[in-house]
Amino acid sequence: MTSGRLTTALGIAILAMLALTVLLPAQQRETTAAAKAKANTLTDLDYIEIQQLVRKSAWALDSGDNYGYAYADLFTPDGAFVGTNQGPEGRTIQGRDQLATLARGGSRGATVQSHLTMNHIVKASADGATGRAYVAIVDVGVVGKPNRVNHGGYYDDEYQKTPQGWRFKRRTYYESKVDVWPASSPRPGQ
Amino acid sequence: MLTALDYLEIEQLVYRYGYALDTGADNGFGYADLYADDATFTGTNQGPSGRTYQGRERLAALARGGKRGPNFMSHWVTNVVIEPAPGGAIGKTYVGIFDIGNGGNGAKSRVDHGGIYNDVYVKTAKGWRFKSRSFFESTSGAPVQPPPAMLTTPRALGPSANPDSRTPNPGTLTAQDYIEIQQLVARYPYALDQNPDDGQSYANLFTTDAVFRQPRTEGRPNLAKMATGAPHGAKYARHFLANHVIEATADGAVGKQYLVAVDIGESGQPSSIFLGGHYEDVYAKTPEGWRFKTRTFIASATGTEAK
């Protein structure tokens, strides 16, 4: 390379650096949000582990395994469950012992299969991931009763990646409710 | 060729569908925007020859025309089977349409109806989208010729194209392993409920020395015979699987999932839940791909009502 070419190349490089210095702050302002979201994209294994977390929560809740602690340990230490259908104001259950108490109340056991979760969507968020899943609570194999859909709704979740894996930071349950029911759509019993 | 992330993103698209349709979010455009520009939805149950909706406005109108609300949950999608296809991917899923939460009118929750979606997916600049989706109402009637779009003969679950991406050492599973085991389990209901080939598709989901319980059934010929003895039809959807959990073991994987067998009402009869319970599985990786080594069904038995 001749010294003339070298000088030209250096000149271009310096100009480019100057241009970058001028442009960068404006670009940074514009792309902060995008960059933040990009920094938190989920890998295939993140998706799979979050799927597994949500599926395990149904098993843990219905089985009441380990005195309810199998369920509690799917949450972060400060994790919370919010049942918006419990009383007029809803109810928040926070802490390992409280969550375990919730999970061992009611009808529990290895042959209880009641919480069906489906339609689980997962999205990256600034500090982990969020998700939603439908949950149908069915009564099957109840002695002396016909099988039926009892009730249902959806979970709104916040997930956090911990050294032990993905955990619930917050899970909120909403009961399903119809707001618009067109006249053309038949109602149950019709 | 689809990557593990492609499978997961298509699955996410399929799951977003329920929310978009049931909430009618964004005046139905939340639903319409799950489709590619020229895509179609066909309700083969709407009128004698079915009805097809094409274009963003028509699809949005469809989504805001039904029962809906921000917290309404009606379309329960599961058993998602995905396959690579020229230009993208094809897939199929079960859908149970439940009436849960009836606007406070005191009506009980119930299974309304259900069936199967057949899909074509296309990867756009914005991500995976439906290119076409068709709904088929479940019927247990005499076996009929399935529509051409249906995946009639489930292809063998081929081994991964990239052997290096698979289980690097015993006791761990790669993303690809998880996806293949999920897909194995998702194919099970189709092989049993639709049974297009005298139980061959069903039997081929198992290893040659596999054992199913109960009733104890061993080996592929006996498994095929058992499947053929169960109710089936080309448009029949009965086995809804959920909560599939997978764990690595020293020589493969184990897993479990919930089952509800739904008898979708036909000829105006109400739908009901035939039975529920769970499967306990052992999976083995064979040269053909992941297969059931043992599969045990345990019926749900509850002393009192679930809360």
Image (cartoon, coloured by chain):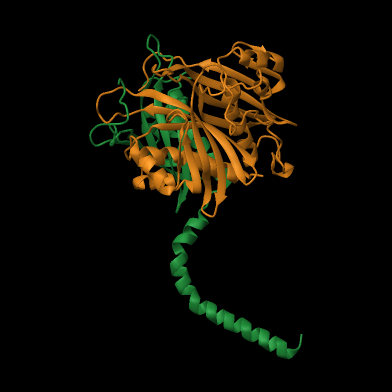
Chain colours: A green, B orange
- Asked whether the viewer can see residue B294, the reply is yes
Of residue B66 and residue A99, the one placed in the foreground of this image is B66
Q: B138 left or right of B296?
A: left
Q: A118 left or right of B109?
A: right
Residue at position x 58%, y 41% in the image: B7
Residue at position x 30%, y 25% in the image: A187
Residue at position x 64%, y 41% in the image: B84
- Asked whether the viewer can see residue A47, the reply is no
Classify A14 as above or below B119.
Answer: below
Where residue B22 sits: x, y (%)?
A: 37, 37
Classify B262 as above or below B171.
Answer: above
- Which residue, as the protein is rendered here, is positioned at the far front? B48
Of residue B298 and residue B30, the one placed in the foreground of this image is B30
Q: A129 left or right of A13?
A: left
Where residue B38 sits: x, y (%)?
A: 50, 48
Looking at the rendering, in which quadrant would you find the C terminus of chain B? top left
Q: Residue B24 is drawn in which quadrant?
A: top left
Where residue B49 sits: x, y (%)?
A: 47, 30
Residue at position x 46%, y 23% in the image: A63
